[in-house]
Image (tube, grey):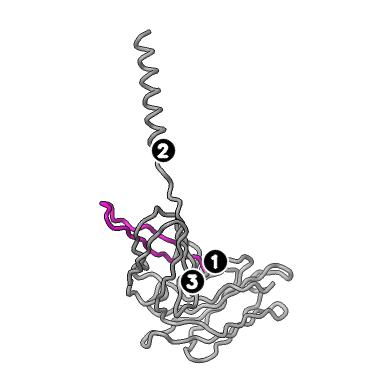
Amino acid sequence: MKRFILAILGLGLLGAGGCGLDNYAEPESKLTGQITYNGDPLGVRGTGEAVQLQLYQDGYELRAPIPVYVKQDGSFEALLFDGEYKLVTRDNNGPWVNDRDTTLVTVKGRTEVTLEVTPYFTLSDVTLALEGETVDASFAINQIVEDANIEYAMLLVNKTAFVDDITYNGRVDLGEATAGTVTEMSLDLAAANIQPGQPVFARVGVRPVGADQAIYSQVVRLR
């Protein structure tokens, strides 16, 4: 009987110890930010955790970066403990120059930060319109990095607000797009399996040669 009672007490102590291990404080401060060029937001692929930033904190034995996933409008957020952090782009990831400049961030409560990068190209004067069951796009491609080249431009549509080169219902590529000129593209919704009356979201993008990601316009709902 004594052995049985001791066993029960032992399990009780283990249980209490286990509960204590789960009582660590959760991070409560929120870091929010935007990736920009000259103050303008940059659009990227937002699905599949394709574009990431990295946070480092000095003074800790473990130096593994904290991944921060970028949304398709170029915004990002992370729950953190208060402290000093270093924010960088992930190595060779994104449609921008891979200089990985460090941005120092002091996180305390709700903290906002802007991360400036140098994209190979930007998009401007973007017009997306729905004419009947055809999506028409017109946009200018601006050369930012002098020796950068365009692999292709693309027009993408989807039934949901998530639109990129992986997540789409319809896609048209243009392999002869040229920076400094107006690019025009069209896409038939019937070929994209989008029926009349269904929602239509669209955006355009440009993939630089040698980059792992494209630069995008912001998503527009057309219907």
Q: Name the foreground residue: 82 vs 201.
A: 82
Quadrant of the image containing the N terminus: top left
Q: Secondary structure at mark 3?
A: loop
Mark 1 or mark 2, earlier in chain:
2
* Residue 20 covered by magenta stretch: no
Q: Secondary structure at mark 1?
A: loop
User: Where on the picture, by quarter, is residue 131?
Assistant: bottom right
From mark 3 to mark 1, how far is it between C-alphas? Answer: 12 Å
- Counting from the top left corner in percent of width and height, residue 112 is at 46, 65
Magenta stretch?
A: 51-72
From mark 2 to mark 3, how far is it between C-alphas? Answer: 37 Å
* Residue 70 covered by magenta stretch: yes
- Up/down of 71 relative to 132, above or below: above
Q: Which residue is mark 3?
A: 44
Q: Name the foreground residue: 132 vs 161.
A: 161
Q: Amino acid at mark 1?
A: Thr
User: Where on the picture, by quarter, is residue 54?
Assistant: bottom left
Residue at figure coordinates x 55%, y 90% from the top left = 182
Which label number is shown at residue 22? 2
- Counting from the top left corner in percent of width and height, residue 20 is at 39, 34
Quadrant of the image containing the C terminus: bottom right
Q: Which residue is mark 1?
A: 167
Mark 3 or mark 1, earlier in chain:
3
Circles 2, 3 touching at the beta carbon (< 8 Å): no
- Up/down of 183 relative to 32, above or below: below
- Counting from the top left corner in percent of width and height, residue 201 is at 63, 71
Q: Amino acid at mark 3?
A: Val
Q: Amino acid at mark 2?
A: Asp
